[in-house]
Amino acid sequence: MNRPMNHHLRSQLSILQKYFDSIPNPISFLDTIIHYNEAFNSKEFIKIIHAYCQREKGKSHLTPIVFWTNLYTHTPLPNCLKISMSPLFPLILLHITVAAAQLRPGHYSKTCPGAELVVRDVMEKALIREPRSLASVMRFQFHDCFVNGCDASMLLDDTTTMLGEKLSLSNINSLRSYEVVDEAKEALEKVCPGVVSCADIIIMASRDAVALTGGPNWEVKLGRLDSLTASQEASDNIMPSPRANASLLIDLFGKFNLSVKDLVALSGSHSIGQGRCFSIMFRLYNQSGTGRPDPALEPKFREKLNKLCPLNVDQNVTGDLDATPFVFDNQYFKDLVAGRGFLNSDQTLFAFPQTRKFVKQFSINQSEFFEAFVEGMIKMGDLQWEQPGEIRRNCRVANIRSVNTF
């Protein structure tokens, strides 16, 4: 057991250590177990786990680990998890995973067969109550999945030991309607407590937001777990600025194995919703430090934006992202061709040759846009990172509140 461990193994086990260290009263966690995926985990890690546990009738779930000798009593396993218990006392394991979840359609068909209908019902009510909320919820998937994978980290509130993603530069005063996800989670907990993850709710709700506003409907893959932490810094470092040009966006999406076509199609999420004056003031009055407006802006559209966002305006005032802000269609791309893109990061897609061809295609053929958008959303929904996870009871708070960032 004292042989050197590779970096991946040390990382996995050090994560476990943090959870054990955070438990104030381990006895309360006796009924929990650790879920894992043998095909994904380090073989070395599996050997260590199997050395100190028993399998339960061939199932893939481990029973609580029992230490058979006093060799590790009150002794830290090097670079791993700290043991502080008597021999034969069950080591209490949290309901976490150290492997990427296996995603598939119909994941809840047996454990919560009505899950997708519950979420769709909540989204339909949100559409009636506040139509703009669907655009906000639809963009949750992008803001969640690009920061450490699709794990609902963006839903976590700040704690005394963690700065979450809600106040990151790209999210503060921009993302809203978190209460819609709360409502969906509350409804699901009533019928299937502890089964459906907040991360999967984001995926389902994003799909429903598109479908309910006139866009395509598609089958989503489910089975994600919720993160136990979030990172404002990670969000700030990853999420693009509204000033970003197409070259920067192509590079960013490429890091996630998303193509130029995916980038342009997913930018079509701006077919619905609104943006803030804060995001376009530089375009109107000081593009690239010139003291002049962006020359790509169509003159009449620029005049309209000048009236909406004068220099002395409250920069949280909002304007429509395209000419049909409550209908998911290809009007967004028609507007870009005409020089009427609201954000710089939108209009830039028509300025660069690599992206312009797709803007033109989608402006002419809405069906082609819908098909590409669905493909991009599915690919983005597959983004996962190796990290522990759980099924949160409350999407705003990790089940283990005392866990620090790591």
Image (cartoon, rainbow, N blue to C red):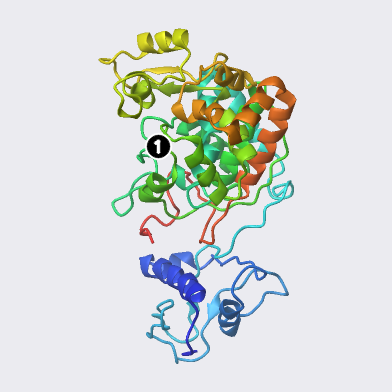
Left or right: 296 as drawn, with respect to 232:
right
- The amino acid type found where label 1 is placed reads Ser
Q: Residue at x 44, y 23 (%)?
A: 275
In the picture, residue 276 is in which quadrant? top left
In percent of width and height, residue 253 lies at 55, 45
In percent of width and height, residue 371 lies at 72, 33
Would residue 45 be visible to someone looking at this image?
Answer: yes
In percent of width and height, residue 319 lies at 44, 16
Q: Which residue is mark 1?
A: 170
Residue 82 in the image: above or below residue 271: below
User: In this view, which residue lies farthest toward the left?
Assistant: 312
- How many discs mark residues in the rendered view? 1
Q: Residue at x 61, y 24 (%)?
A: 124
In-front residue for pair 321/64: 321
Residue 66 in the image: above or below residue 390: below
In percent of width and height, residue 194 lies at 57, 50
In-front residue for pair 328/61: 328
Q: Residues within 10 Å of mark 1 (few under 14, many from 20)?
A: many
Residue 75 in the image: above or below residue 227: below
Left or right: 314 as drawn, with respect to 140:
left
**Quadrant that contains the C terminus:** bottom left
Instruction: Give the structural element (helix, strand or loop) at label 1.
Output: loop
In-front residue for pair 2/275: 275
